[in-house]
Image (cartoon, helix red, strand yellow):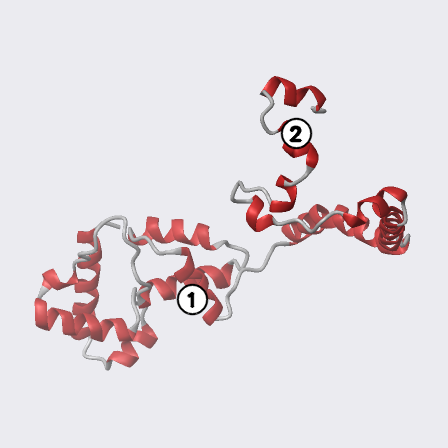
Amino acid sequence: MSEEERIYEILSTIRNIEESKQPVSVYFDQNSVPFSRAQYYRYRRILKKHGKEGLRDERKNGNYTKLTERIKDYVIAIVKEKRSISSSQLQINILNQFNVQISLSSLNNFRASTSLTRLLTREEENYKRQKSGGGEILTSLSFFTHIVELYTRTITEQVNAVRQSPLFEQNKDIERDNPDIRLHGKFTREYNQLESVRENRFKSIDDKITDKDF
């Protein structure tokens, strides 16, 4: 629907209501109106203050539009008919019907406020269960076979074995590391005083790397 068609529909509907000589509430109850009663009074105020031009949507393309009463009524009707419709599909339908862009967050919030959140179809629900079935099977097996406890016990035993090994005992006397100094590219005073360091300090690179294990 173009902008001109939208304005024409609003004006013609307001004229029909006024010419009917019926109370507004009665007219809305007995006739199909493309907008709500609250929106009708709002349009009347806009026309009185700004005229026909006040009905134009001055929002720039690319900006999200707020949910109007008319769009809310449209969303409610569509979702009640098909609860499985996604908000992204609703967004497309609204764009085609009203030529306005509504954000997904606005649609989701409105659906939640009206208890019209999406309900998956039976096929989608079955697919969701099948998709996650593999992980559930592996989790169940891990608990049933006590494999987690086995891994934990194995790791603990290996750590204890390392702590009791001769190599661990041999390295217990190594001085505490100094990461604050090492991270700044500095050697500790203890390291600089090692005999091997003092002997190799002024050797060439070629001599130093002969004993390195790369």
- Of residues 12 and 44, which is closer to you in this image? 44
Q: Residue furthest top?
A: 206
- Of residues 162 and 105, which is closer to you in this image? 162
- Of residues 210 and 39, which is closer to you in this image? 210
| Vertical side of 176 occupied by 108: above or below | below
Residue depicted at 56% across the width and 50% down the height = 180
| Vertical side of 104 occupied by 17: above or below | below
Element assignment for label 2: helix
| Vertical side of 86 occupied by 183: above or below | above
Label 1, on which residue? 110
On the image, the x and y values in percent for residue 130 come to: 72, 47
The quarter of the picture where residue 15 lies is bottom left
For the residue marked with disc 2, what is the amino acid?
Answer: Glu
The C terminus lies in quadrant? top right
Left or right? Give the position of 105 relative to 174.
left
Circle nearer the viewer, 2 or 1: 2
For the residue marked with disc 1, what is the amino acid?
Answer: Phe
- Of residues 142 and 182, which is closer to you in this image? 182
| Vertical side of 113 occupied by 25: above or below | below
Left or right? Give the position of 181 relative to 22.
right
